[in-house]
Structures are given as C-alpha cells and as structure tokens.
Image: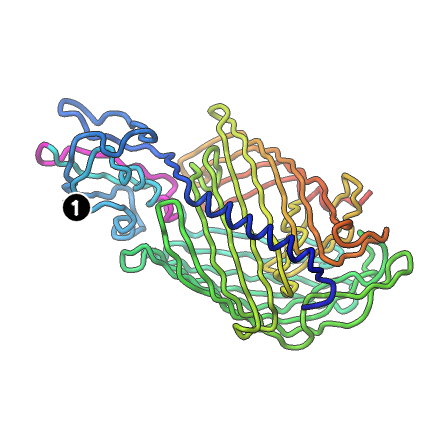
C-alpha cells in the first residue's frame, strides 16, 4: 500500500462500506408491486377494465386454467424470447389475482426490447379456461448509448460513439461496442488518445433465470496530473501527462432473482503499461509535496472479482415518474488473485420518484462509493463521477482537467480523484409529451444538490490536509431529456456552467 493511507481513514471507510451493504440488502428484501393486470372477462361482455392488485390477496378470485399464451405485436423479436420471460405455463391452474400475472408485464419489459407491454386475460374454450394475451409495442433495439464530442484546453477535440444491438436478429443476444479518439493539447507529455470496447451478452439461457455477459477493452491514453501552480489553474504549463496502455477482459454470469431484481458477477483481468513519472509537486506557496499517481511504473496487472445487485421498480426506465431503483457493486482485487493492486471498491446508487400531479413528479438521486487500499488510478472516484457539471471521462480516459465551480468557497480546485465521494440531488420533472413512434417522449427537468470528494492524504494550497481538505459544493442542472428510438438524449446547462472560468 502506498504511503498516506491512514488507519483512521481505513476504519471509517470500512464502516461506510459495511453500512452501505446492509442498506442495499435491506432494500433488496423490500416488496413492491406497481403494475396492473386484467381480470378474467365477464360472460356477457368485454373484459373488465384493469384492476390494481397491489393490496389484493393472492388467493382472491376464482380458479382458472391457462389454455394458451399468445403474443401480439412482435415483429422482430422471436416469440420464444417473450414466452421465456413470462412466468406462466400452458395448462397451469391459478387464482385470477395470482401475483405472477402482475409480474409478467415487468418481466417482459425487463427484456429492454419493448416500449410498452400489457397482459390481459380472454375467455377460453370452456368455463374456467382463459387465454393469456401478451401485447408488446417494440422499440428500436439498436441503441446509441453514448455520443462523445467536445473540446478543452487539455484536448482540442474528442469524438466517439457507443452502440448496442440489444436483440440481434430477434434472438435476444446483445452485441455492443464503442470507439473514441481524442487529440492532445499543449500539455507536456500528452499524446493522442484512443480506445475501443466490444461487449456480448445473453439473458434467459436455455429458458432459465441465468444469463452471461462479457467485454473486451483496449486503450492508448495519456493521463494528466498537476505539477505546479494554484489549485484550479487552467494554465497548461502547470500540468503534465504520462502515457499508458490498458488491455483487459471481463465477464461472468447473471441471475434474475425476481422480475425486478437481479444479480451479476464479474471476473476482471487487465494489463496496464504506464510510464509513471517520479517526483514532487510544487504548490503555489512554494511547498513541495510527493506525487501519488495511483499506478505502478511499467507493467502491472489488475485481477479482481465483483458482484453487483440491481432492483428496479420504476414505471419507466428512461422517463420515470414513480417507483425506485437501487444498484450496488462490490469489487475486490489483490495479489492473491494474481494482480498487482490490493483494493476494495464499493459503489451504490439510489433513485426514488413520487408523482405529484398527472404531469409532475419529484425525484431524489443519491450515488457514492468508497475505495479501500491501493486501487489503481482508473478505479478511484473521479470528480466528474459525482459532479455532472464537469466533463466526464470518455471510456475511462481523461479529456478535460477543468476545476469545478466553487459556489461555497470550499477550495475544491484540486479535486480530481478520491477514495470517498458521492452526491445527493433532488429533481423536478415535467412530462412534456408522449408519442407512439420514433420520439417516444420528453421531460423538462430542474435539479440541484450537493457533492463531495475526499482524497486521503490530499494537501490544499491553504495547508489543509486529510479530512480538513474535503471539498463539498453544489451541483445544479436544468434541461430537456428525450426518449427516442435510437436512445436517450439530454440537452442540459450543467456542462456549460462547468466550463465557466472559476471565480
């Protein structure tokens, strides 16, 4: 472990990780039902309107027998993929209020291939026999996940994109990937950067709850660090960069515990080759401090095991107005596994939405994490991970070094990487429109919150160090979020505000 990792900080972060895991497990055990189902049709008329089953006893209603399960509306998705997701079987006897009927809609929606799903019961060939009709509205399965472009003092330009085909030829297979290229500015040691990634995945293997996923990634990057000058300075003469290469693979199984809850595991093996410089940094007041760039010089390896948890009960995964989502991940790497770095990384994210009126909603988002031990630089928390007013890393590569706005005067100009960080943001959303084709909907939103990032052993220009150097500040945003057949697009003021020179 590198110098500067204090025992008190380790114990504090260990307690935080333990608490985070307990909260995630408690949330995972919570029960939620936010869907609607159709009861059996009456003998003398059309099916009755949907009845909410949130508070209905599962044993309520007459016994019925499933005569058949029909799928309507699928044009490019194989019927077997949809039927495999429905937790019902032909010939099965159940009550009309059985929770599996309500769960079927969520299960099919969770495939990610459909914009809407309805599940209804129709009269069968005899009394007590019903036909389950699953009606789907397909959405484009080719999704634009990321579109990277921009410029900064560090990189005169960067350009790239990330695409995913979520349902290859209707088979349910996922194939995706991305490429990016960034030029270099007038920073000593900088060079052009490029990277690429290829991803594969499959859910519901052989009709089970198990799935599998994997990815291959390559990068030729140039990592920037501050060598001199005042915190927050945008002068390239105060910065330097060192070159590195990354080549890695990761993959593992996934398991759907319920229609809204799933787990996944990963094995990660990565080779890093970095020309890490040795030396000191000279602060603006003349003091000299040792540099910790978070990587071993020359060739090193990252070998880790990770487990993730995801529970999503939101009514819409893109433009939600009610429900919640909780995600958590724990990654452990070390020499015992064959790596060069001993570390533990715990990350968590929570989101909750409350509908206020038919077109209005209020949401709260919280995200954060803790890093214990000697994690490589790329696995530490970056300031743009907790403050969306800054340019994020592009496929893990740094393309901008702009300091965050200092609204509260907490002297956050040196905040770049840390071992403990997070944010808490409240958001108001207005449902502007919903449409059936191409551009499915748009929400106007306003958001505000706080963020913080702690770097163990960090030294500020005013002499503060350790926990006294913890910057906490505001993050604000507003704009338009659009759901389209190609993906999600956001037009916001956050990045523009983050480019305003510090005052």
Report whether 441 appears left or right of 189. Answer: left
Residue at the location (70% across, 52% down)?
454
Report whether 322 appears left or right of 125. Answer: right
Residue at the location (48% across, 28% down)?
355
* Label 1, residues with CA under 10 Å away: few <14, some 14-19, many ≥20: few
Instruction: Please state which of residues 234 and 25 is positioned toward the viewer in this rendering.
Output: 25
Dot 1: element: loop
Residue under label 1: 90
Q: Is residue 121 magenta?
A: yes
User: What is the magenta range?
Assistant: 109-127
Up-down: is 4 above or below 338?
A: above
Instruction: Please state which of residues 158 and 322 is positioned toward the viewer in this rendering.
Output: 322
The single residue placed furthest to the left in the displayed view is 126
Image quadrant holding the N terminus, namely bottom right
User: At which x and y percent is residue 333?
Assistant: 55, 66
Q: Which of the 4 image quarters holds residue 132?
A: top left
Report whether 55 appears left or right of 2. Answer: left
């Amino acid at each position: 472990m590198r110098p500067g990792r204090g025992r008190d900080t380790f114990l504090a972060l260990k307690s935080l990780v333990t608490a985070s895991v307990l909260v995630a497990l408690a949330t995972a055990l919570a029960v939620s039902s936010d869907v609607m189902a159709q009861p059996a049709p009456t003998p003398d008329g059309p099916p009755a309107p949907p009845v909410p089953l949130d508070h209905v006893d599962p044993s309520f209603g007459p016994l019925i027998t499933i005569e058949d399960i029909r799928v309507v509306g699928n044009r490019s998705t194989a019927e077997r993929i949809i039927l495999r997701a429905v937790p019902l079987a032909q010939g099965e006897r159940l009550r009309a209020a059985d929770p599996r009927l309500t769960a079927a809609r969520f299960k099919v929606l969770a495939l990610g291939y459909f914009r809407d799903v309805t599940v209804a019961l129709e009269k069968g060939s005899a009394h007590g026999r019903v036909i389950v009709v699953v009606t789907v509205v397909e959405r484009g399965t080719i999704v634009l996940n990321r579109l990277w472009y921009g410029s900064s003092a560090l990189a005169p330009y960067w350009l790239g994109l990330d695409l995913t085909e979520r349902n290859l030829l209707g088979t349910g297979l996922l194939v995706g990937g991305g490429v990016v290229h960034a030029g270099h500015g007038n920073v000593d040691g900088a060079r052009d950067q490029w990277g690429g990634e290829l991803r594969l995945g499959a859910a519901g293997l052989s009709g089970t709850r198990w799935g599998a996923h994997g990815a291959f990634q390559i990068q030729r990057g140039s990592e920037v660090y501050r060598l001199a000058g005042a915190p927050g300075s945008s002068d390239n003469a105060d910065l330097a960069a060192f070159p590195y290469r990354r080549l890695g693979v990761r993959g593992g199984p996934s398991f759907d515990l319920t229609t809204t809850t799933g787990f996944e595991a990963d094995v990660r093996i990565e080779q890093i080759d970095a020309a890490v410089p040795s030396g000191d940094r000279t602060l603006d007041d003349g003091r000299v401090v040792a540099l910790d760039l978070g990587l071993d010089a020359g060739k090193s390896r990252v070998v880790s095991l990770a487990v993730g948890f995801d529970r999503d009960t939101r009514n819409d995964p893109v433009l939600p107005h009610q429900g919640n989502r909780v995600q958590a991940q724990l990654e452990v790497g070390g020499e015992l596994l064959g790596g060069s770095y001993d570390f533990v990384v715990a990350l968590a994210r929570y989101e909750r939405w409350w509908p206020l009126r038919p077109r209005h909603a209020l949401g709260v988002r919280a995200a954060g994490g803790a890093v214990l031990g000697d994690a490589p630089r790329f696995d530490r928390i970056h300031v743009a991970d907790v403050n969306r007013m800054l340019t994020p890393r592009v496929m893990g590569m740094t393309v901008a070094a702009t300091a965050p706005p200092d609204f509260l005067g907490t002297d956050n100009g040196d905040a770049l990487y840390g071992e403990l960080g997070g944010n808490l943001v409240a958001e108001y959303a207005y449902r502007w429109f919903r449409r059936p084709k191409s551009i499915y909907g748009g929400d106007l939103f306003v958001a505000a919150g706080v963020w913080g990032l702690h770097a163990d052993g960090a030294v500020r220009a005013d002499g503060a160090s350790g926990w006294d150097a913890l910057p906490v500040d505001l993050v604000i945003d507003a704009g338009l979020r659009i759901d389209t057949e190609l993906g999600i697009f956001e037009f916001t003021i956050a990045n523009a505000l983050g480019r305003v020179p510090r005052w």
